[in-house]
């Protein structure tokens, strides 16, 4: 007897199986992601904003009214050539992407405020 399993590829959510005799069964594997909230003040020197393990969602908001924030995924220092978030700008890592590692940030001026939330499994 063989079984065909259809899932999201991450081993989470719903999995449906069809057996040789044509019977369909669905199994739910609920997962709970734990949110981590970080409020920080960033300057003109790159710094790690987040260090996550198996994040299924990341949101970063430049809460500063006048300075630009730059973000980079990885351990290399962020520069003004990286992803730019203007004042009030936001970045959303899609929930279909899983990320493990650091998020580096640097700003166009001292005392730039930022809010980040990461959901980790």
Image (tube, rainbow, N blue to C red):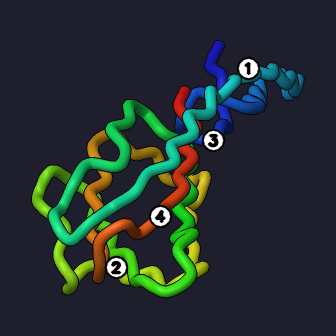
Mark 1 surroundings: few (<14), some (14-19) or many (≥20) residues within 10 A = few
Disc 4 residue crowd, few under 14, some 14–19, many 20+, Cα 10 Å: many
Circle 3 sits on which residue? 8
Report the mark closest to the observer, 2 or 3.
2
- Of mark 2 and mark 4, the one earlier in the sequence is 2
Q: Nearer the viewer, mark 1 or mark 4?
A: 4
Task: Work out how far the residue at label 2 is from the one at label 3, CA to CA, in angstroms.
Answer: 29 Å
In-front residue for pair 71/109: 109
| Separation (CA) of disc 1 from disc 4 | 38 Å
Residue at left 80%, top 22%?
A: 28
Q: Residue 83, which numbered label?
A: 2
Marks 2 and 4, how far apart in space? 16 Å
Find residue 18 and report its horizontal and vertical position in percent.
77, 28
The quadrant the N terminus occupies is: top right
Numbered badge on residue 68 = none
Q: Which label sits on residue 113?
A: 4
Dot 4 falls on a residue whose secondary structure is strand
* Discs 2, 4 touching: Cβ within 8 Å: no
User: Residue reaching furthest front?
Assistant: 111
């Amino acid at each position: 007897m063989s079984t065909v399993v259809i899932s999201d590829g991450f081993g989470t959510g719903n999995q449906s199986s069809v057996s040789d005799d044509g019977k369909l069964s669905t199994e739910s594997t609920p997962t709970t992601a734990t949110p981590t909230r970080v409020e920080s003040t960033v300057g003109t020197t790159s710094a790690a904003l987040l260090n996550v393990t198996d994040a299924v969602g990341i949101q970063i908001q430049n809460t500063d009214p006048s300075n630009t924030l730059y973000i980079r995924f990885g351990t290399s220092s962020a520069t003004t050539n990286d992803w730019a978030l203007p004042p009030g700008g936001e970045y959303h890592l899609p929930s279909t992407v899983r990320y493990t590692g650091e998020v580096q940030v640097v700003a166009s001026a001292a005392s730039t405020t930022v809010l980040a939330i990461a959901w980790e499994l």
